[in-house]
Amino acid sequence: MFLSFVIVSQNNSEKLMNTLISIKEQTDDDYEIVLVDDSGFQPKSSALEFMNEHFYANGKKIQVITNLRSQGFSYNLNTAIAVARGNYFMIVDEGEIVYKTAIAVLKANIAKHQVEHKQIDMVEFRLHYPHSKGNSEIRNKTNMLLSPKTDKEILAYTHPLIFTKIFCRKLILQKNIEFLNYRRTDAFFIYNILAKSNGFLAIDDILAACELGLVNYSVFDLLKQWIYIFNLYRDLNLYREYQEELEYAFLRFCLITFLRLVRLQNNKTLSIKAINSAENKLERRYKNFIKNKYIKDIKEPKFKIIVSDIKGFIKNWKLENTK
């Protein structure tokens, strides 16, 4: 089996059914769905009825795990990955719309770039954000099989969102890579894989639509996970080798990804805490960052402007979001 779609459902039947319908319309049926129902046991759930009618009855492979009480996003992902049967798995957010050619596109790209004795462990693709009418960015070289061990820039440029990737399940199991329980550790999971991966492929295709918005966890969890990332690379004796890549990725995460997500919450108190936290973390790394080799050739116009005057950007962000 090529792909397992991994979904954690948290009691939003309408969103879940929209996602399941989009998966059912795949032009290539070499897939399964692993659904973890984290909302508590609901034997008459409309989502379960939908699956019974459209998947079970038509012979589609689907596994449903129902928790009697909520176990948390990370715990449920680990559970789903452990029982998945696909060579690759794709973590799909509840409400995400997977484009009908997603599997076909992924299959074709892997077949095209796969080489003997070198496994493709991660494929990065793009998402569409309908409400903002934008797309996620691919900053790595596209349509080339790369290796994090030699193409170190991968660690600087990889999008820190799990929903823009498919992952090789064999590598995850062999290297005992897991999400940290009861924490939101998207980026930590990605960087754990990159530390142990041989094959990375980025493609420019947009394979799904997903809207970023309010979160049901602390946004500070996303910032705190970088402590685990830095410590992981120290434990593996890789920190010195990848220090510039990790520093660049972290600074960009603070200034772009983290603050963008904070802004979406539309919460003045949260914004004040967030910008102060980001500013404190950046202050300690600022001197090293201005010497970082990656800031000499920033291809993102917006980030290039920010880096040219980080302190000015932080000041303006405070004025715009903490009034």
Image (cartoon, rainbow, N blue to C red):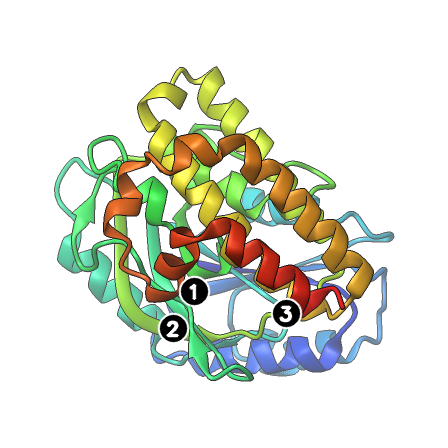
Looking at the image, residue 298 sits to the left or right of residue 53; the answer is left
Helix, strand or loop under label 1: strand
Kind of residue indicated by mark 2: Leu
Kind of residue indicated by mark 3: Glu
Q: Residue at x 62, y 45 (%)?
A: 278
Earlier residue among tags 1 and 3: 1
Label number found at residue 94: 3
Earlier residue among tags 2 and 3: 3
Kind of residue indicated by mark 1: Tyr
Distance (Cα) linking label 2 and label 1: 15 Å
Helix, strand or loop under label 3: loop
Label number found at residue 96: none
Distance (Cα) linking label 2 and label 3: 15 Å
* Residue linked to disc 2: 207
Looking at the image, residue 139 sits to the left or right of residue 228; the answer is left
Pick whichever, 22 or 317, lies toward us. Answer: 317
Earlier residue among tags 2 and 1: 1
Camera-near label (2 vs 1) is 2
User: Looking at the picture, does residue 25 appear above or below residue 59?
Assistant: below
Which image quadrant for residue 172? top left
Circle 1 Cα neighbour tier, 10 Å, few/some/many (<14 / 14–19 / ≥20): many
Question: Quadrant where the C terminus lies?
Answer: bottom right
Circle 3 Cα neighbour tier, 10 Å, few/some/many (<14 / 14–19 / ≥20): many
Distance (Cα) linking label 1 and label 3: 18 Å
Camera-near label (1 vs 3) is 3
